[in-house]
């Protein structure tokens, strides 16, 4: 198991290969549909003007995401009333929902890793090579186990999106993932899909 510290350099990203197990250490954010849509519309495509605390949040996120990691996760969080936040469950969300946004977000913020489940598509894979960044697959169905890797909740932005959709800033230690899309154009998800298609065709025949 290889240990990788966040922020991650381009050199380390290019050294990671499909199938490689990794423990991540450092600070990352969670972001799902609402957060990705907000980032793209407000700061990348600029189809909506910044509102409320948008600009302050953007400035706060830039240093975290430069070399950083985005986790597709809608956590279960305790301590909401007291703001003594703790992740109770932190399983990965299906990543393909962010396919329209992901490469643009990674490029804009110079982020280096995406964590989720199920893999992503051609646009994201192309972005992996260009930015560069990698896609890390997290363990589905192990939300409580993964939450144990979250040492501390450092803060939360865009809480108005709701707890699962808010942008949580977390410090993690030995967060277990596997590289399934790398910066060299390799996608384990693509390989599995093709192999499964062949088996299905043979079964039908």
Image (tube, grey):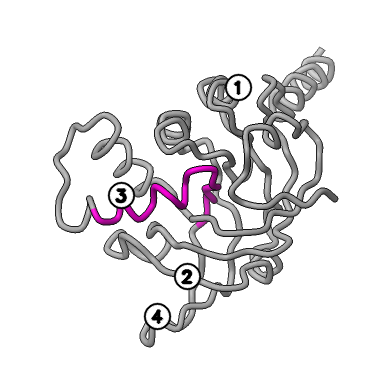
Q: Is residue 28 left or right of residue 40?
A: right
Identify the residue position indicated by label 3 in the image. 58
**SS assignment at label 4:** loop
Q: Residue furthest bottom?
A: 82
Identify the residue position indicated by label 2 in the image. 154
Disc on the earlier residue, 4 or 2 = 4
Q: Could you say where residue 133 lies in the image, as x and y percent from the top left?
A: 59, 33
Label annotation for residue 80: 4
**68 part of magenta stretch:** yes
**SS assignment at label 3:** helix
The residue segment tinted magenta is 56-73
Identify the residue position indicated by label 1 in the image. 129
Disc on the earlier residue, 2 or 1 = 1
Residue that appears at 71% across and 22% down: 186
Label annotation for residue 165: none
Cα gap from disc 4 to disc 2, whole angstroms: 13 Å
Q: Quadrant of the C terminus?
A: top right
Cα gap from disc 2 to disc 1, whole angstroms: 31 Å
Mark 4 is surrounded, within 10 Å at the Cα level, by few (under 14), some (14 to 19) or many (20 or more) other residues, namely few
Mark 3 is surrounded, within 10 Å at the Cα level, by few (under 14), some (14 to 19) or many (20 or more) other residues, namely some
Cα gap from disc 3 to disc 2, whole angstroms: 16 Å
Mark 2 is surrounded, within 10 Å at the Cα level, by few (under 14), some (14 to 19) or many (20 or more) other residues, namely some
Disc on the earlier residue, 3 or 4 = 3
Residue 150: image quadrant is bottom right
**SS assignment at label 2:** strand
Q: Nearer the viewer, mark 3 or mark 4?
A: 3
């Amino acid at each position: 198991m290889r240990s990788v510290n966040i922020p991650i350099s381009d050199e380390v990203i290019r050294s990671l290969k499909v199938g490689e197990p990794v423990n991540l250490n450092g600070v990352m954010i969670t972001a799902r549909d609402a957060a990705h849509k907000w980032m793209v519309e407000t700061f990348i495509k600029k189809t909506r003007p910044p509102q409320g605390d948008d600009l302050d949040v953007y400035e706060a996120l830039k240093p975290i995401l430069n070399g950083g990691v985005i986790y597709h996760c809608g956590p279960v969080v305790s301590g909401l009333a007291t703001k003594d936040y703790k992740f109770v469950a932190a399983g990965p969300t299906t990543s393909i929902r962010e396919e329209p946004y992901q490469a643009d977000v990674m490029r804009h913020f110079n982020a280096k890793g995406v964590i989720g489940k199920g893999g992503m598509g051609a646009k994201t894979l192309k972005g992996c090579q260009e930015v560069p960044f990698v896609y890390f697959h997290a363990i589905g169905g192990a939300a409580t186990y993964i939450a144990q890797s979250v040492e501390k909740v450092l803060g939360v932005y865009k809480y108005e999106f709701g707890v699962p959709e808010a942008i949580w800033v977390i410090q993690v230690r030995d967060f277990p993932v596997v590289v399934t899309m790398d910066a060299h154009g390799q996608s384990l998800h693509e390989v599995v899909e093709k192999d499964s298609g062949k088996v299905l065709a043979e079964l039908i025949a």
